[in-house]
Image (tube, grey):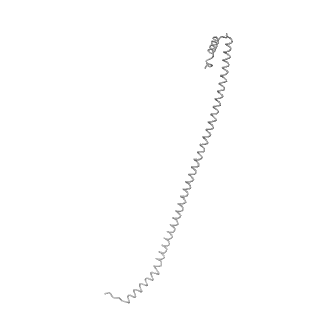
C-alpha cells in the first residue's frame, strides 16, 4: 500500500515552496505586470472610445443644428423672395393700370378733338350748302315748287363725297 514517508513530504513541501518563491520572483511579477499593463491599456482604450463617441455625438448634434439653421435660413430667403416677387408684381400691375388709364385718356382726348374737327368741318359744309342753296333760290323766282326743284337740283349737282 501507500506509505507516507515524512522526510519525503518535508522535502516535497520545501521544493514546492522554493519553486513557488522562484516563480513568484521570476515569473509572477512579470505576468502580473503584463496583465496590469494590458488592463490599463484596455481601460485607456475604453475611455478614449467613450470620449470619441461623446465628441462624435456632440459633432452630430452641432451638424443637426447647422442643418436646421440652414433650412430655416432657406425658408426665410424663400419667403423674402416670394414677398419681393409679389411686391414687384403689384408694382408692375399698378404701373400698367396707370399707363392704360393715361392711354385711355389720350384716346378720349383724340376722339374728342377729331369729333370737334368733324363738327367744324360739317358746320362749314352746311353753311356752304345753305349759302349755295340760298343763292340759287334768290336767283330764281320765289315760289314753293320752284324752290323745291332748285334745292333738289343743287343737291344732285353736289359731288358724291359731300352727299355721303
Q: How many marks?
A: 0
Q: Is residue 36 rendered to the left or right of residue 85?
A: left
| Quadrant, the N terminus | bottom left
Outermost residue, left direction?
A: 1
The residue nearer to you, when weighing 145 against 116, is 145
Q: Position of residue 92 (x, y in %)?
A: 61, 41
The residue nearer to you, when weighing 69 against 47, is 69
Above or below: residue 131 compared with residue 5: above
Outermost residue, top direction?
A: 141
Above or below: residue 134 compared with residue 49: above
Above or below: residue 17 compared with residue 152: below
Q: Position of residue 5 (x, y in %)?
A: 36, 89
Q: Is residue 153 rendered to the left or right of residue 21?
A: right
The residue nearer to you, when weighing 40 against 66, is 66
Q: Position of residue 83 (x, y in %)?
A: 59, 47
Quarter of image, res 138: top right
Q: Position of residue 39 (x, y in %)?
A: 48, 73
Above or below: residue 52 compared with residue 162: below
Quarter of image, res 164: top right
Amino acid at each position: 500500500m501507500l506509505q507516507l514517508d515524512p522526510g519525503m513530504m518535508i522535502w516535497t513541501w520545501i521544493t514546492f515552496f522554493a519553486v513557488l518563491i522562484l516563480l513568484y520572483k521570476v515569473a509572477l511579477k512579470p505576468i502580473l505586470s503584463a496583465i496590469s499593463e494590458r488592463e490599463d491599456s484596455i481601460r485607456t482604450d475604453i475611455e478614449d472610445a467613450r470620449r470619441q463617441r461623446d465628441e462624435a455625438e456632440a459633432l452630430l448634434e452641432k451638424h443637426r443644428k447647422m442643418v436646421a439653421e440652414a433650412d430655416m435660413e432657406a425658408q426665410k430667403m424663400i419667403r423674402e423672395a416670394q414677398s419681393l416677387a409679389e411686391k414687384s408684381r403689384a408694382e408692375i400691375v399698378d404701373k400698367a393700370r396707370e399707363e392704360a388709364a393715361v392711354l385711355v385718356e389720350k384716346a378720349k382726348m383724340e376722339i374728342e378733338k377729331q369729333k370737334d374737327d368733324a363738327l367744324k368741318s360739317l358746320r362749314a359744309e352746311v353753311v356752304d350748302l345753305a349759302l349755295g342753296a340760298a343763292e340759287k333760290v334768290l336767283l330764281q323766282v320765289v315760289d314753293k315748287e320752284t324752290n323745291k326743284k332748285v334745292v333738289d337740283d343743287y343737291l344732285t349737282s353736289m359731288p358724291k363725297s359731300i352727299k355721303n
